[in-house]
């Protein structure tokens, strides 16, 4: 089980850091900073604080040999 669920939005993957009800009127910038989120989405009466999952980049490829 993942600690943070993964969602797809506009063909991008995001890791959900926190959901807060709109009715609680959260201070978005403060929560965004506290959760280390780069995006805030709104859906179904919640603010979703999420971080975009960037595509993996192969920096170095090493072929391992069995010992």
Image (spheres, rainbow, N blue to C red):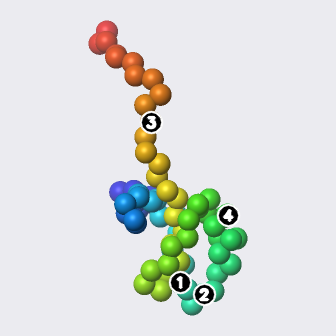
Q: Which mark is residue 33?
A: 4
The span from disc 1 to disc 4 (Cα, nearest Å) is 17 Å
Q: Residue at x 45, y 59 (%)?
A: 14
User: As displayed, is residue 60 above or below residue 53?
Assistant: above
Alpha-carbon distance for marks 2 and 3? 39 Å
- Horizontal and vertical percent for residue 6? 39, 60
Separation (CA) of disc 3 from disc 1: 36 Å
**Image side of residue 3 versus residue 24, left or right:** left
CA–CA distance between discs 1 and 2?
Answer: 6 Å
- Which mark is first along the chain, 3 or 4? 4
The crowd level at tag 3 (other Cα within 10 Å; few <14, some 14-19, many 20+) is few
Mark 2 — residue? 24
Residue 18 x/y as whole percent: 53, 69
| Label 1 close to label 2 by CB (< 8 Å) | yes
Residue 9 horizontal side relative to residue 32, left or right:
left
Q: Secondary structure at mark 1?
A: strand
x, y percentage for residue 26?
A: 64, 81
Q: Residue at x 31, y 12 (%)?
A: 65
Relative to 24, residue 56 above or below = above
Instruction: Give the mark nearer the N terminus: 2 vs 4.
Output: 2
Residue bearing the label numbered 1: 21
Calculate the distance from the C-alpha at mark 2 to the C-alpha at mark 4.
18 Å
Residue on which the image places disc 3: 57
Q: Position of residue 31 (x, y in %)?
A: 65, 70
On the image, which quarter does residue 1 sit in? bottom left
Mark 2 falls on what kind of element?
Answer: helix
**Mark 4 neighbour density, 10 Å: few (under 14) some (14–19) many (20 or more):** few
């Amino acid at each position: 089980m993942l600690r943070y669920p993964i969602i797809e939005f506009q063909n991008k993957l995001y890791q959900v850091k926190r959901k807060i009800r709109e009715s609680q009127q959260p201070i978005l910038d403060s929560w965004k900073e506290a959760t280390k989120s780069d995006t805030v989405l709104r859906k179904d009466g919640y603010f979703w604080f999420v971080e975009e999952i960037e595509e993996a980049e192969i920096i170095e490829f090493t072929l391992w040999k069995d010992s």
